[in-house]
Image: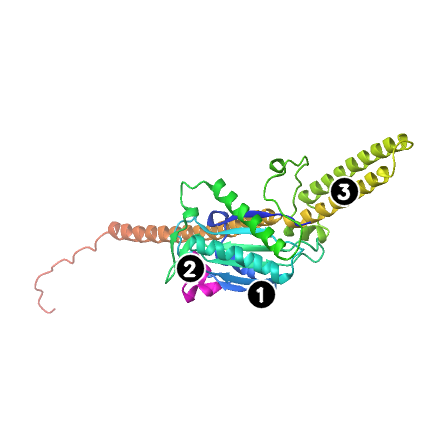
Amino acid sequence: MAIYHLSVKAVSRSAGRSATAAAAYRAGCEIADQRTGEIHNYTRKGGVESADIVLPDSAPEWATDRAALWNAAEAAERRKDACVAREFEVALPDELSPAERRRLAVDFAKEMANREGCAVDVAIHAPGKEGDSRNHHAHILRTTRKVGLDGLTDKLDTEKAGRSRTADLDAVRTRWAELTNERLRENGIEALVDHRSLKDQGIDREPTSHMGPAVAAMERRGVKTEVGQRIEDEVADRLARARAEGVKERELAQANKSIIDLSGDLAAAKRDLAATELVGQAKTQLVSGAADFRTKFMADRAAKIEADRHAELDRQVAERAQLEAKTRAALAKEAQAAKEQPAPAPKKDRGYEPGR
């Protein structure tokens, strides 16, 4: 069963994030940030299946260099709260081959690049080793400005003030569903995805919570988290309700056993299948949604580092000011002492004295 997932996140300086760090992490490479002097090295990161720079037709050659591209994104912004990049995280169908999953993500990025004139960095990540093996996903990092001959130029239309963010997001979500279903049909796969909410689809089922890779990794190391516990409780509650409903239905089937055929066994099989699918969905969701959790965690960490740096600079400035004040006070004291020292008495003129 193909799973639909598309979420959008801003890479903003106000959250302590940078485009260079985001790109280096997602592509599993090293990028030196020319603005801050920091070196973001994620070459030892595993699970990166591919990383592609996707540009508009006739884009300049310089933009094919990942480090140059994302340093240009940082250089183009002056505000301390600027949004330097925007990320689209999408789930890739397990039913497709690795080559087809890559083609799907790159084609989606190419449409975006040509439509908006931006540069797009597409990194495909493999499922976690201990998570759901179907959790193939891509991180699609997009510039917020258009690609020019020597750097990034104007803001994209979708980044300008006054835009309907809801309408823009709905258009992107719709297109991702359409393109995904096209690829599934091309490969002879009957599964389909739907970008609409359960309510809009007419499905009477509660939405499920998501745990992302950061929380999932902590859980695998034996570190219990609030998110993990909440999802475990949800799964347990739903399984308990499924079992209770199954018991009631089986009791009813037993009472009417004399007037029904094999439909009772079929209903029980369907209930067991539904319970199995529920567990599978819950496991998938334990891994698929922690980008928000990780984003907040990394943002808080970066903000603390920045605050500590500013505090150290303030302390040094205060020390220099204090030293200068002491020096000025000492000089003033010496000058005052010199003023208050009595002048030497003049020598008395004795006149001419013979023999001297």
Residue lying farthest to the bottom in this orientation: 355
Q: Residue at x 86, y 31 (%)?
A: 252
Magenta-drawn stretch contains 65: yes
Place of residue 310 in the rendered image (x, y in percent of width and height, measured from the top left)? 46, 51
Kindly report the distance in space between the C-alpha atoms of the residues bearing marks 1 and 3.
Answer: 42 Å
Residue 29 sits above or below residue 19 on the image: below
Residue numbers of the magenta segment: 57-73
Magenta-drawn stretch contains 161: no
Dot placed on the residue nearer the N-terminal end, 2 or 3: 2
Q: Nearer the viewer, residue 320 or 204?
A: 204
* Mark 1: amino acid: Thr
Place of residue 158 in the rendered image (x, y in percent of width and height, measured from the top left)? 43, 47
Q: Which mark is residue 43?
A: 1
Dot placed on the residue nearer the N-terminal end, 1 or 3: 1
Whether residue 300 sits left or right of residue 232 in the image: it is: left
Kindly report the distance in space between the C-alpha atoms of the residues bearing marks 1 and 2.
Answer: 21 Å
Q: Nearer the viewer, mark 1 or mark 3?
A: 3
Residue annotated with mark 3: 274
Q: Mark yes or no: residue 326 visible.
A: yes
* Mark 2: amino acid: Ala
